[in-house]
Amino acid sequence: MLFLKECKKVIFSLTFWIYCLIVVLDFTSQYYPDCRKAASPPYDGYKLSEDHGRIMEGAVKSLAEGYLANRYICYPLGFYKAVKLNEKERGQIEECLEELTGLSAAEISALDESAEKYGVYDGLHEYTGYTIESIPLSDTLTYERFTELMGKVDDTLGGGSDFKPDDLVFHFSKETLTKEEALKEYADFTDKDRITGALARLFSDYAGITLGILPVFVAAALTAADRKRRMTELVYSRRISSFRLIFTRFAALTVTMFVPVLLTMAAALIQAVRIYGGSNISYAAMFTVPSFWLIPNIMEAAAAGMLLTELISGGAAILVQFVLWFIPLLKDSGMLWGNISRFTLICRHNSLFYREQFITHMGAFVFSRIFYILISLILVLLTVLVYELKRGGRFNGVRLFGESGILRRKA
Amino acid sequence: MSDNIIIKGVNKSYGKKQVLFDIDLTIEKGMFGLLGRNGAGKTTLMKTLAALHKKNSGEITVCGVPIENAAEIRAMTGYLPQEFSMYPSMRTDEVLCYLGTLSGIPSRECKKRVTSLLRRVDLIEHRHKKIKELSGGMKRRLGIAQAILHDPKVLIVDEPTAGLDPEERIRFRNLMCELAEDRIVLLSTHIVGDIEATCEQIAIMDSGKILWRGTVSELLKEAEGHIYTVNVAKRFLPQIKKEYIVTGMLAQNEYITVRIVSDAEPDLPNPVQTAPDLEGAYMYCLRSRGCDVCGGDE
Amino acid sequence: MVFGCLVRAAYSDAKHNYLIHYLLAVAVVLSIPMLFGVNDLDAKAAAQPLELMMPFTGIILMTPVFMPEQDENIRDTVRAKKMSYELVCLMRLLMAAAVMLALTGTFVLFMKYCGSDVSFRHFCGAAVSAAAVGSIGFFTAAVSDNTIVGYMAAVIYYVMNFLLKSRLGMFYVFSMSSGSFSEKKWLLLIAVLLSAAGLIGRRYRTNMM
């Protein structure tokens, strides 16, 4: 059977064994130690109150402090960037502040006197930092207008600031959990999630990162093997349809790469049984959620790897998938739970608690998983098309800048 | 259903460079040799017939099936490329099984066929060897085995004897002849000896055109009266090579017997007209059709 | 004579096999100011864009050194030539190193121009980090005879630096961003050793095949 033969090819490839090694290392170094002890109620946890008044107050205060010091801390890609504005840009911020607070320009400048000042030295320059006691909000300010203005502010700052409308809730409505809330989170963990439901989310969070990138290597190596071994023509001239061949290869890649993940799930389940006892936990939850969570990741990376390797080269496939994987990972590094949108490739939920948060994003989560399954199927269909064209001699690879140009990829 | 290949007015170019010009050819059952120099367009024609290249214009039908119907063409042709290799870490029988599966042969049937084929190409004792451990000749034979694995009606082999030692070459030819008994075998080569030993029907290609088409005996007949042997002193050899096409030499002491191709009787002492051999006839054919041939300067 | 030959070979090689990689490396460097702030950074913050991004040029330039000859036919043809195959690879490696140094140097100067507190130390540290990550790819590609495996090893090493941070000890390539320079001498040693081992390993491997 072709499927088994293709699986065998994958299993005997070096990239697959490196893949397995990393999957296991990732499990033993991240998830496993995190879950070694029985979880206790998250007394030091925090929640996002999403209280509009609180958000507006906090954001405007922080903006005014930045304005006075003319120094705003941004994280455009998850990395620290201190932004200093010129007069014109500073004027734009001032206008926003006037509208937000209802104060005049002079009154805003006067905040300087009442604010508490402190020296900041960042290694190069010395700054004066400001802490404002309190700041009024304009009576006519609505939350919608507020987010609009914050969007403007974020644009002026070059993006990645705390004022980015989508992130306002996260930055300005954090509250530590009360004891009751922590106990409720814990009760959710044991009762609603039956423990493994929560463990499965944490497991998927860690495994998802690895599976967002590693399958591309295995797929690229398998796809490039025919060309590298000068076997393309022998394969091209066979009877099998391109559709069947490519889809079988894709299925073989997905299934073989899922097996080691499945084994780590089983290991996680054994660990859970040993810690929490077999009767309190749901056995199925350790498999269902992670499978639904992770298979689309394997599929997407494998499909992208196949298409781009067939179209250009293995290196190109790796580069593209790396960018797709790395940049969102850096950008979201502040919000490790409750932040799944409909197009999130790598879903995060780096906690055993906050079940409610996950449930509220359930629609987006399901959407994103199905979306990426469909995307990968489309990518595989495109691979079939490219393969069929190459096979019939109608496409000889991408050429950039002419016949003997810099990027040639002979089919 | 007819069992021949009909090629009508086929043109093919790679980008701006045209490599096949108005090819017209009918290939019947049996062994058919495509003879031509390197770069004559043989490989391109063969790849086009195996549905691996797209022609720009013209018509091709293989056993009644138009070439555009690639899936059906692939099902009934076996192709051995000029240059190929296989996954180096797979075993000989594994590779054949893999390619058999790609040809849609059920696995039990495939195993049986692989064993009998390996016996036929004399690789049975090497069936557990990895591809990277095989010699060049063994790989060629394995190549032939993969091409006939699905028992194709048409077998296309591109320069199959390049790089084989004389003994292996003979074995290879014999195998080809056996295979040609019940199918079309299209063989391309630039080695005249291969054709001489195996093919009845031949075509000669040069610069993307079919120069000549017929049987071996017709080719020989055409060259009759144009092949001479002369016996000259060795020191004249360079001059003779300059003026004539030399297809063979036999040295005896300070004299040398030279076989030359010439339209008219050569202006040399005691030329003797001899029965043409295929090599001479091939050279004559190329020369008489205006190809730039420089014989002897090897 | 030999030198002239080498220069011509290097030029032809760069044009036919490597131009796309050089351009990609340049693209990586050009993307830094879009992804990171480079104005008025202090010494520690200035190390961050350099250490995070320059290793990509290492991966892009050093890993595919053996790629043009991955096809065994081409390799045998190249190996049969008078100029030793290892010399061709070494030449490519040196070209890669030269481009890497040039890019790092240019970017450090650009940062200085933008008012960041960069020094020669930054240049050395970033270049060494790039070479260390690149040499992992180079070495792995050499011994596995597979460029994709090379990329895989290099990318895994890079990502491990993210996850494990200074727990990697002397293997930590982002150390300058957290104010420590002592790892760099080890990284330099690793880069040199792995490059040499890659060339030697390649020789052994190709002879074996």
Image (cartoon, coloured by chain):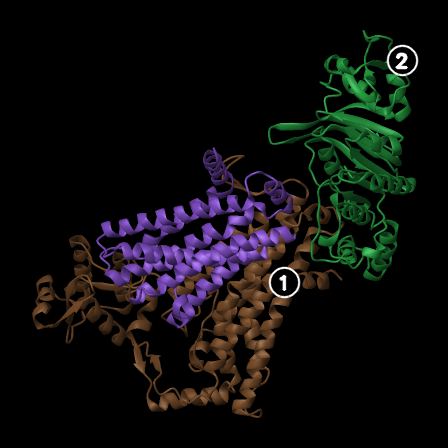
Chain colours: A brown, B green, C purple
Q: Residue at x 63, y 49 (%)?
A: A228
**Foreground: A168 or C136?**
C136
Please name the residue that numbered disc 1 is placed on.
A253
Q: Is residue B171 visible?
A: yes
- The answer for which chain carries disc 2 is B
Please name the residue that numbered disc 2 is placed on.
B273
Q: Quadrant of the N terminus of chain A?
A: bottom right
A243 shown above or below A66: above
Q: Residue at x 55, y 75 (%)?
A: A290
Task: Indicate the position of residue A223 as horizontal and vertical percent values.
Answer: 62, 54
Q: Residue at x 31, y 47 (%)?
A: C106
Q: Which numbered mark, 1 or 2, is in the foreground of this view? A: 2
Decide if residue A273 is on the left or right side of residue B45: left
Q: Residues within 10 Å of mark 2 (few under 14, many from 20)?
A: some
- The answer for which chain carries disc 1 is A
Q: Residue at x 31, y 62 (%)?
A: A160
Where on the picture, by quarter, is residue C133? bottom left
C155 shown above or below B48: below
Q: Is residue B63 visible?
A: no
Task: Indicate the position of residue C209 as horizontal and vertical percent values.
Answer: 65, 52
Report the label total: 2
Q: Amino acid at mark 2?
A: Gln
Task: Indicate the position of residue A389 as horizontal and vertical percent values.
Answer: 64, 44
Q: Residues within 10 Å of mark 1 (few under 14, many from 20)?
A: many
Decide if residue B27 is on the left or right side of residue C64: right
- SS under mark 2: strand
Task: Indicate the position of residue B16 as horizontal and vertical percent values.
Answer: 60, 28
B32 shown above or below A7: above
- SS under mark 1: helix
Q: Quadrant of the C terminus of chain A?
A: top right
**Foreground: A229 or A407?**
A229
Do discs 1 and 2 share a chain?
A: no
